[in-house]
Image (cartoon, coloured by chain):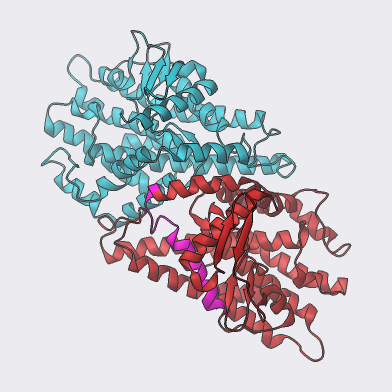
Chain colours: A cyan, B red
């Protein structure tokens, strides 16, 4: 880790911790010269969420906690709550975290769509699938739009790497860690990362099923968690918006958006756009974990390569469809139905 | 002018001058402590373009020059040409120009859509029109989207105030001045400002017509200039793109966008989105000049209030339609037809 990384990680941990203290470990001390972060030790039985998902453990509060974390950190750092002055000051500060933004650009939006020495996939099973990704012009068109949005759109302070390996859990506690990729970017990148990684976990389950546990009930729990995460996020985010609609937020001045009809219109449009962004970014995150450089333990821990490839292909095919057709979906229930069809 | 303003003006003048030296006056010296800009004196017969448009003077090279200025300054400061690192460094620098961004937000995207003591219009003729703007929910929905894009989307270094009062002209020379509002924002804001102010000039002509000159030929010249400006911009911008497609631009890596079909797809999509942005921002700029705080001499110089109101209403009605239905238009020729119908 470079010294820069530690600085931005500590900065983001403190800001996220201020906004969502229940779900972010407290930073006690940061020393910039030493790049030293002193922070809460997440004691056992906290484990990385991804490992819990592989083990088939249910976390009844996960959706609620993650919805709360995402709603608070994204809403309160957006122009729905803040003034342009505060926003531009913080955007400028986090522009300094450019090296990690570049890394994301490369591994999420570039490498999977070109021949790259770093790419790998479950070969030979997925050779043709990986090639198809590289040759899919409509897919690459959509990826370009998401990449531009990732670089250009300073919508809120995002975690920047909100997959299931950046969350530590017990049945009662959910703690978001490792925000060293944080910067002002599109909200959908965080929401999509979390939902996309739950979808990866879902498709990996058939590879973990055995005679003792067919994982069917667990797959249903994952689907419910995906659905609840979005729905609860939607509720919490719009509640915060309603609560603060007469505040300092620069985006929708109360003197302009001054009647219930127009308020409903803007909120519905905002949330629909955010939903489509989340689906797009989520799909991109799935694709890169199957044909890109960095894979996920959900699939990697399936030792039978043919079985692994079959799980991966279903996730990949869903993601390609979502990326290209995301604007046709109106709600998360439709996504759950789509997942079941792959 | 605050000292901040002079700093960002000199910074933008130098950058724009480097990219488009034929159309930006040279800066000889800037002293930050003194907020002193020493720059080329634009000698007579240079006059402010807006005054020329009111006087009915044709500028045969205007469209070509402005297309050149916009194509070069916007392309070379975008991710089509630059790396993310350079981009974020400059975005951060221009975040400092926040006070002027806030002023634009207020006068362009807020004031016209609410009751504000600073608003004025040709009363009593346009009283009902001004009220209708404030009560138009679909219009306010679109304005919100443009405002968010203005604040959040760092697409390129934009001039930020590219109306016909920021351009000095002779028949042979076109010089863009006063970029004190410059920051990294959406390209369409500049293109829309220029086209929108030409549209204002068009609708003002009937108020300047007299027995000696019915202005009919001049109106045709303005329409042709609007059409040529966009078409030449499109040509120059896409030529620059083609020329530099194998360069350091981060948005579309040549190893991914590696066949003529996908290159055509991404370019067409990019330019269509930019066209729609330009129409939206242009329409917002027209509206604010009729029912907002700052008006334009094109209309103000029409002394007969009834006649002035009639000209203004036609521009306002066109702008409202454009703002709400801009995505239906596929090319500038359709816009020219629409202008003729109002």
Tell me: A89 left or right of A143.
Answer: right
Tell which of A4 and A138 is nearer to you. Answer: A4
Residue at 51%, 66% (x, y): give it: B17
Q: Position of residue A168 (x, y in %)?
A: 36, 18
In the image, residue A91 sits, relative to residue B223, either above or below, namely: above
Whole-percent x and y of residue A59?
38, 16
Q: How many marks?
A: 0
B143 over B341 or under it: above or below? above
Question: Above or below — where is A16 with respect to B27?
Answer: above
Q: Residue at x 26, y 21 (%)?
A: A54
Horizontal relation, residue B37 to residue B91: left or right? right
- In the picture, the quarter occupied by the C terminus of chain B is bottom right
Say whether residue B68 is magenta: yes
Residue occupying the far bottom of the picture:
B212
Q: Position of residue B143 (x, y in %)?
A: 64, 52
Residue A275 belongs to the span the image colors magenta: no
Residue A88 visible at all: yes
Magenta: main secondary structure: helix
Give x and y (percent) for residue B263. 32, 63
Q: Is residue A162 left or right of residue B210?
A: left
Quadrant assignment, res A49? top left
Q: Which segment did they paint magenta?
A: B62-85
* Residue at the spot 77% in from the left edge and 70% down from the top edge: B297
Q: Is residue B132 above or below residue A33?
A: below
Could one spot residue B277 in this view of the protein? no
């Amino acid at each position: 880790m470079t010294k820069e990384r530690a600085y931005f990680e500590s900065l983001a941990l403190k800001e996220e911790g201020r906004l969502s203290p229940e779900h972010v470990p407290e930073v006690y001390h940061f020393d910039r010269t030493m790049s030293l972060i002193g922070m809460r030790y997440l004691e056992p039985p906290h484990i990385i969420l991804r490992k819990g998902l592989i083990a088939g453990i249910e976390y009844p509060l996960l959706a609620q906690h993650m919805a709360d974390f995402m709603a608070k950190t994204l809403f309160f750092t957006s122009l729905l709550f803040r003034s342009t002055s505060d926003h531009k000051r913080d955007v400028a500060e986090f522009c300094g975290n450019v090296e990690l933004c570049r890394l994301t650009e490369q591994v999420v939006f570039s490498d999977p769509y070109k021949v790259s020495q770093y790419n790998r996939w479950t070969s030979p099973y997925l050779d043709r699938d990986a090639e198809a990704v590289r040759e899919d012009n409509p897919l690459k068109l959509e990826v370009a739009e998401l990449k531009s949005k990732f670089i250009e759109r300073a919508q809120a302070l995002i975690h920047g790497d909100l997959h299931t390996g950046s969350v530590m859990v017990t049945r009662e506690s959910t703690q978001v860690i490792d925000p060293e990729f944080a910067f002002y970017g599109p909200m959908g990148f965080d929401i999509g990362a979390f939902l996309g990684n739950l979808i990866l976990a879902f498709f990996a389950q058939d590879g973990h099923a055995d005679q003792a546990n067919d994982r069917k009930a667990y797959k249903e729990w994952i689907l419910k968690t995906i659905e609840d995460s979005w729905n609860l996020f939607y509720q919490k985010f719009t509640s915060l918006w309603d609560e603060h609609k007469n505040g300092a937020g620069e985006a929708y001045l109360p003197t302009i958006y001054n009647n219930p009809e127009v308020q409903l219109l803007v909120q519905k449009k905002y949330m629909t756009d955010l939903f489509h962004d989340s689906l797009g970014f989520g799909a991109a995150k799935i694709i890169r974990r199957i044909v890109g450089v960095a894979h996920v333990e959900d699939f990697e821990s399936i030792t039978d390569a043919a079985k692994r490839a079959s799980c991966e292909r279903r996730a990949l095919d869903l993601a390609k469809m979502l990326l290209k057709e995301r604007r046709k979906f109106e709600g998360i229930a439709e996504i759950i139905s789509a997942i079941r069809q792959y």
